[in-house]
Image (cartoon, rainbow, N blue to C red):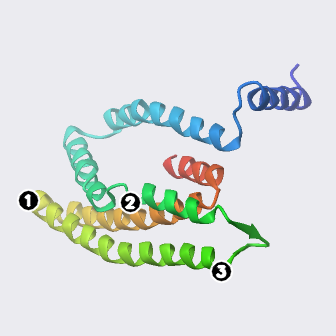
Amino acid sequence: NITISAIETFLSNLKDFSRHKLGIDKPVAWILVNKIWTILRGPISLYFLIRYLSPEQQGIWYSFVNLGALTTFAELGFTMIITQFVSHEYVNLKLENGYIVGDQYGLDRLFSLVRYSMRFYFVVIPAAVVVLFAAGFYLFNDQPPKTMIAWMLYALFGGANLMVALLQSIYQGLNKVADIQKNIFIGSL
């Protein structure tokens, strides 16, 4: 019989091996988990789409996903840039008791960057949602009203997802890579 302590010992040894021999720490491990999940997610989604949706529903689902990809134009890698800049400004700062502390100049630059990115997104997100609404209205105007309502909700959640991506990029820049990768993994499940 395999006992709980044997499993815990195995996992502990695996953790030590991966950390010391392979150089895999917690952030890298979560990144690997996300990459593996990304590979598995496609076939799993495809199975459920084929199994449980009619061909017409599949077409609508694929249309939603493809139109939702328009949010990429609203984002255009801005979150990656924000992560890099926040990380650059955070180098001389640190987190103590839930507060970011350090020299005033570094704090001012960091918070100025965060304010700018938030203001930018408060303009970009509504514009992206309006574009998504318009694209959906054009494409789904001959569909039942429930499809249009579903599209509008999808577009609103797409806009909210843009804000979440911005906040995650800011947090990741504060040396919280493992936390954000874990959050992304749980969110993608």
Q: Position of residue 49 (x, y in %)?
A: 34, 37
The alpha-carbon separation of the residues under discs 2 and 3 comes to 26 Å
Q: Nearer the viewer, mark 2 or mark 3?
A: 3
Above or below residue 182? Residue 171 is: below
Query: Residue drawn 51% across and 66% down?
Result: 167
Give SS at disc 3: helix
What kind of residue is marked 2? Phe
Q: Position of residue 41 (x, y in %)?
A: 45, 36
**The one of 175 and 41 positioned closer to us in this rendering:** 175
User: Mark 2 and 3 residues: CB-CB less than 8 Å, in contact?
Assistant: no
| Image quarter of residue 129 | bottom left
**Horizontal arrangement in the rendering, residue 34 relative to residue 148 (left or right):** right
In the picture of the structure, the residue carrying the numbered disc 3 is 104
Q: Position of residue 18 (x, y in %)?
A: 74, 28
Above or below residue 149? Residue 83 is: above
What kind of residue is marked 3? Gln
Q: Earlier in the sequence, mark 2 or mark 3?
A: 2
In the picture of the structure, the residue carrying the numbered disc 2 is 78
Query: Residue drawn 65% across and 37% down?
Result: 29
In the picture of the structure, the residue carrying the numbered disc 1 is 142
Query: Residue drawn 49% across and 73% down?
Result: 113
What kind of residue is marked 1? Asp
Mark 1 packing: few (<14 Cα in 10 Å), some, or many (20+)? few
Give SS at disc 1: loop
**Horizontal arrangement in the rendering, residue 70 relative to residue 27 (left or right):** left
Q: Earlier in the sequence, mark 1 or mark 3?
A: 3
Check residue 5 in the rendering and tell me which mark sits there, or answer none: none
Give SS at disc 2: helix
**The one of 110 and 166 positioned closer to us in this rendering:** 110
**The one of 119 and 35 positioned closer to us in this rendering:** 119
User: Mark 1 and 2 residues: CB-CB less than 8 Å, in contact?
Assistant: no
